[in-house]
Amino acid sequence: MAQADPSFAPPSAAERRVYRHRLPTRIWHWINAATLLVLLMSGLMIFNAHPRLYWGHYGANVDPAWLAIGSTPDTGYLRIGAARIDTTGVLGRWTDAAGVEKTWAFPGWATIPTRYSLADGRRWHLFFAWVLAISLTLYMLWSLFGGHLKNDLHVRRAEWSPRHIWRDVKDHARLRFPSGEAAARYNILQKLSYIGVIFVALPLMIATGLAMSPGMDAAAPWLVDLFGGRQSARSLHFIAAWALVLFFFIHIVMVLLAGPVNEIRSMISGWFRLPRAKGDGA
């Protein structure tokens, strides 16, 4: 729950502010944003080395892939199962800034580095994977023992009501954002999405990343077996990564619609200006 500064005397209802985001949340938010961007872009470079996904322990060019990004002499394509989509100019076959046609799965502007280099992509990816793992561990510990999980993210019994959840879904769909004191608290959709990211999606990314490491085959084969094989771990890693990308885009859209200046300022300074509730004076 947002913590108000008792020494702060707001001049009017329209200007009321609360201390919404504590320092550890703000630091982790920006470190996590930068880290995930680098991990995504370097991960796409690694994917370019073999742009096919499989289930099980093994996978190579001759094996049936459930997802593939490739090219023919004239087109680029994305294939998921039996469905095939023409992606010429975007995926599989595209033209770089110098006008040279390339056949990597993902274009250079979306990868780190921008040129093809599997070795460099792995260096970037592994370094920032450690940044993610360490920062996430510290943030999870602070959330558990610092009160963030209990005070901000804990889902109350009444919030589990299907009627309550459905009302929140409709309010978001109609762009009806909370105002007054309600704006200082996380709603049920925010709580579920943040819990899902912090305690499910990001740990899954780390665990599946470890399961793809050859060293883990020897040190902890049970982890590889837990995901059904290295290729299954790679597929789950890819799916989780794009689930995080989807969360990011929804998050950005909600920030823009709710008032980007107030939202971004609160994630920098911690102070959030409460939107005026109906009936409040000017």
Image (tube, rainbow, N blue to C red):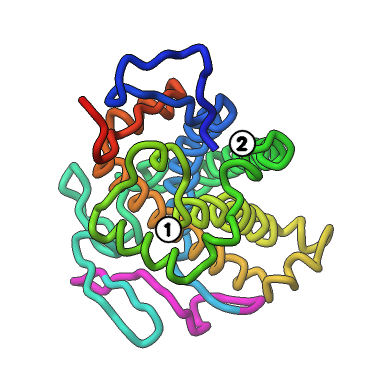
Residue 180 lies within the magenta run: no
Label of residue 48 in the image? 1
Three-letter amino acid code at disc 2? Val
Q: Position of residue 82 (x, y in %)?
A: 36, 87
Residue appearing at x 44%, y 57% in the figure: 189
What residue is shown with label 2? 131
Q: Please, which residue is most extreme toward the left here?
A: 99
Under mark 1, the amino acid is: Asn
Q: Earlier in the sequence, mark 1 or mark 2?
A: 1
**Is label 1 or label 2 in front?**
2
Q: Residue furthest right?
A: 219
Q: Residue at x 41, y 54 (%)?
A: 247
Above/below status of 186 relative to 34: below
Mark 2: give few (<14), some (14-19) or many (20+) Cα within 10 Å. Answer: some
Q: Quadrant of the N terminus?
A: top right
Question: In which quadrant of the rendered view does residue 172 lie?
Answer: bottom left
Q: Which residues are magenta?
A: 56-76
* Residue at the farthest bottom position: 82
Task: Determine whether 251 is above or below 166 in the image.
Answer: above
- Give me the residue at 19% from left, 43% from top: 97
Left or right: 260 as drawn, with respect to 146: left
Main secondary-structure element of the magenta-colored stretch? loop
- Out of 265 and 51, give the one closest to the viewer: 265
Residue 128 picture location, percent across and down: 57, 38
